[in-house]
Amino acid sequence: MSSPLLAVEGLSISFPGEGGHMRVVDRVSLSVAAGETLALVGESGCGKSMTALAIMRLIPKPGRIEPGGRIQFEGRDLLSLSVPDMRAIRGARIGMIFQEPMTSLNPVTTVGDQVMEAIELHADIPREEARGRVMELFGLVGIPDPKSRFVAYPHQLSGGLKQRVLIAMAMAMRPRLLIADEPTTALDATIRAQILELLRDLSAKTGTAVLLITHDFGVVNEVADRVAVMYAGQIVEQGTRVELLSRPRHPYTQGLLRSIPKAEARGHRLEEIKGTVPRPGHWPSGCRFHTRCPFAFAPCPIEEPVRTPVSPTHAACCHLVEREVQP
Amino acid sequence: MAAYLTRRIGYGLVTVFGVLFLLFVLFFAVTDPDDIARKAVGERARPEVYAQWKKNHGYDKPLFINMQASDAKRYTDTLLFEHYRRMLTFDFGRSDADDSPISSRLREGAGPSLSLTVPLFVFGLALSVAVALFVAFFRETYVDRLMLVVCMLTMSVASLLYIIAGQYLVGQLLKWFPISGFDPDPAVIARFLALPVLVGVVSGFGADTRFYRTIFLEEISRDYVRTARAKGCGDARVMVRHVLRNALIPILTNVVVQIPFLFTGVLLLESFFGIPGLGALTVEAIQGNDFSTLRTMVYLGALLFILGQILTDISYALADPRVRLG
């Protein structure tokens, strides 16, 4: 297997808090191959957004990436790059879009200029040419009437259009990787489907790999090739979409899937995972899910489970799975 | 935009009428015109002199209703009506203290005042905005904390102390600049203004810098800043192109309203440094029971404040497309 486009290995992120550093992301490893879409799934506060920001090296202060982890992208370790080198990667080789299209655009500049800035930061081309490229991009992401939208201010556009502008901005330099942090959470259901379709189309057309952060298995089902499930700062299960959706091995993944409303379960009480997500940095001992797990047994509160492969592409971190595989 | 402006000016006019009424109550109803006249001519002046002075200065009419007059004159030949008429037509009359025409004194004082306040305003604003941007960039580091100490120190010292210490250190000991005085000759004016401008900038520095820093920090934490970084903007570009541009809106509120007041000068600085501006004129009027001058200055202050508010709204519209186009 050739080396993947993005390989995160042993990434830990900590924030200073009462009583020392709190690890909000703990030894996360994941990889994204060129052109594929990996969905990173988890509840709020599980560290999925921090993982994404770490890849861009945009962890908000005073958080920091702990030494020992590596983020390999196109064969280079992003964590050891100089600041200007990293800046050259942001927006050019890796694009990123965020959850809140409403507030993610600069309110006092036209959206055309904001997308154009993404081009001018990385390519030394005449303004007219850059303008033309922005128009092209607007067409690509399905913004009708690009000419008049170019001079529009963010407050004049709807949420869906703003997200399209942000996608155009992230795709401006044809990045190899697009990180989409809950891109549809703030949007209406109908717009959500359109934006997901756009992301899928763009990825297919340009060969851009996508790291999609979401808490919504509906979204996963629509676009993901592979899925990684995060709980309490760790990745608990990883596999292809089919493997994860049809044969989930980790009790947490199983719980998440059961708690999706389904048409055939109409009239029945919706299942939920009991308990609440532990506070970031205040994780339980042993397996962090043991406090909420219906199958927890003796080793769970004591011993941390190890990553156990169940197929060449599927692995889970659970004592139950460990027993099953190696009795 | 035109409708917006018309409405703002309309509100302004209503406010002016209200201000004039308050002024009337303060300067005519509460302060008895008889008292003013007696203070001006002296307790033991002959009744004719006293009556003549009241007539000359327009204090000889009844307050609200003139029972001796007939028809419309009953309401127009009164102190209240005269007060409105004079103020609205900028016919300020003569000083109660020395009979000099107030409007010519205003013209004489505006120049020295502006020559002090304009550089004070420009340097003060540039310095505090630049320092605030700088410390906001280095937030939560020792640079930021050191600057916090400096700001708190400059805020804690009374401005009177800056004046006296400045005159003593720079004027008396170092002899760099004259201790006080003024000369409008362009060749030497800077020598006289340097020290008061310096003192003014230092005494306003702390509060302004803290204020602008708060504004910048608020902008830095916004989502669009993260977007700018994600597309590859460097720190300096983020601060200037994105943060400063957005912070301009709240900064304008604080700044534009001050601009009209540049005309009225600075009370303390002018009187301590012997600058014959409108601030010094006001202090003089307070000390000399010069009610007509004082009234004029208070009225002008209110007018300028209203003007500042309207200017702020206009500048808002220019800086923020949401106001301009919304």
Image: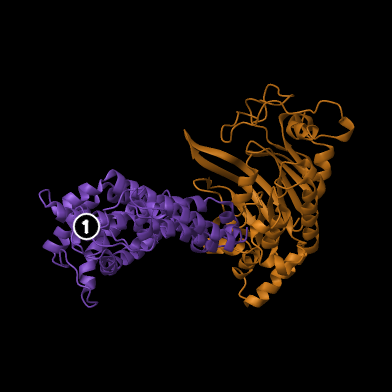
Chain colours: A orange, B purple
> Dot 1: within a 10 Å radius of its alpha carbon, few (fewer than 14), some, or many (20 or more) residues?
many
Nearest to the observer: residue B91 or residue B235: B91
Residue at numbered disc 1: B96
Residue at 11% in and 52% down? B45
Chain containing mark 1: B
Task: From the viewer's perspective, tell me whether residue A144 is left or right of residue B277.
Answer: right
Task: From the viewer's perspective, tell me whether residue B44 is left or right of residue A99.
Answer: left
Nearest to the observer: residue A2 or residue A273: A273
**A270 shown above or below B93:** above
Look at the image and tell me in which quarter the N terminus of chain A lies. bottom right
Nearest to the observer: residue A5 or residue B42: B42
Residue A224 visible in this rendered orientation of the protein: no
The outermost residue toward the top is A298
Look at the image and tell me in which quarter the C terminus of chain A lies. top right
Mark 1 residue element = loop
Residue at 69% in and 26% down? A292
Residue B275 visible in this rendered orientation of the protein: yes
- The picture quadrant where one finds residue A220 is top right
Task: From the viewer's perspective, tell me whether residue B304 is left or right of residue A302.
Answer: left
Task: Please state the horizontal and vertical placement of residue A60, each as a whole percent of the image.
Answer: 54, 48
The outermost residue toward the right is A264
Task: Please state the horizontal and vertical placement of residue A13, each as a whole percent of the image.
Answer: 56, 44
Task: Please state the horizontal and vertical placement of residue A228, each as a whole percent of the image.
Answer: 72, 43
Q: Total of numbered circles in the picture?
A: 1
Task: Please state the horizontal and vertical placement of residue B259, each as a whole percent of the image.
Answer: 39, 62
Mark 1: amino acid: Asp
